[in-house]
Amino acid sequence: MPYHGVISRYGSLMDLPPHTHPVTLLEGNTPLIPVQRLAEEMGGGFDLYVKYEGLNPTGSFKDRGMTAAVSEAVGRGARAVICASTGNTAASAAAYAARAGIRAVVLVPEGKIALGKLAGALAYGAQVVQVKGSFDDALRLVVEISRKHPLALVNSINPYRLEGQKTAAFEICDTLGDAPDWLCLPVGNAGNITAYWMGFRRYNAEKGTALPRLLGVQAAGAAPLVVGHPVERPETVATAIRIGRPARGEQALQAAQESGGRIIAVSDDEILAMQSLLAQLEGIWVEPASAAGLAGLAAEIRAGRLDPRAKTIVAVCTGHGLKDPDIILRRTPNILTIPAELAALEEAVLG
Ligand SMILES: *Cc1c(COP(=O)(O)O)cnc(C)c1O
């Protein structure tokens, strides 16, 4: 059967109102890639998979939630959507609004968003507004304006975003034939971990699949769910999870606890080291935030905290590496330049 996106495939398991009018870019259906060399590098003894969400239409998992939120908004006659974003939500909202023929307004923290994301939002024709402040300030503003004016809010406080995002849990169960023992993923505003838990619970109720333990991973400089209070000035290279006041924080903590899992923090160095390892060992380039789940898994294994009975582990890699090329180029030493002569090439390559 041809593929028509997540609402078409999983709509019967999504709580969307009858007025929903599907707007799709054929998001979802992303690969679950076995990464056994990486698993061996971490110590081995389990099967490790990457759910590569960077292969969605705008390069991140946000498209799963955006198809649902924009479809619902368009179905009730919305002419404009608005969101605050660390970047990927902005690009996704802009693309789905374009697809629907409506307006998109996106608020981003000034100077703190990765180049590929800003370019995306502009390319899809959104109105981009920079806020002198953090993501959390931008979110507060869009909540306020959407209460007063007919602008449909498509941040993950919009419940339909989670309805869309939970389809990734369905796909993982469909591919593996059951849920994994552990699911590792980055946590920022905490919508995604909440959505995964909704998805796994729904499949458990409908189809009797197991429930995984959830390992949510924050960046150490932006880890409100680990330190137990909001972080006023969140700082991390992983801009997608640079959030100090997660809108779905309570639900995320509850999901992790109910699952028998936990939420931990890793350093920026651990995140960047894992980004390199994944790219150079497996050929999968993800943006920094997307390496946090795997970095957290590696840290748990090193500390001897991973249940040795865990046989199947899935790490969600939330966004594509092309979103944030700067982070690689900044760390790269000068690239060798040679004259256009064979001898020079031989010297460079063979030493
Ligand atoms: C949005 C985003 C996250 C964080 O997801 P939350 O639902 O905010 O926890 C992680 N990685 C990437 C690439 C993202 O775009």
Image: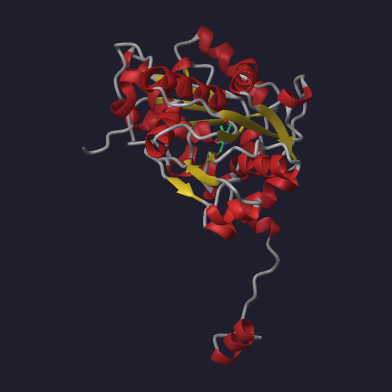
For ligand 1, the image quadrant comes to top right
Q: Residue furthest front?
A: 309
Q: Residue at horizontal 41%, vertical 29%?
A: 170
Q: In the drawing, does residue 7 fall left or right of residue 264?
A: left
Q: Residue furthest bottom?
A: 343
Q: In the drawing, does residue 262 fall left or right of residue 8?
A: right
Quarter of the image where one finds residue 1 = top left
Q: Which quadrant: the C terminus?
A: bottom right
Q: Is residue 328 above or below residue 136?
A: below
In the rendered image, residue 245, in percent from the top left (x then y), is placed at 69, 21
Residue 8 in view, yes or no = yes
In the rendered image, residue 320, in percent from the top left (x then y), is placed at 51, 46
Q: Residue furthest left?
A: 1
Q: Is residue 10 above or below residue 340?
A: above
Q: Which is nearer the eye, 211 or 132? A: 211
Q: Which is nearer the eye, 339 or 224? A: 224
Colouring scheme applied when the structure was drawn: secondary structure
In the rendered image, residue 308, in percent from the top left (x then y), is placed at 64, 39
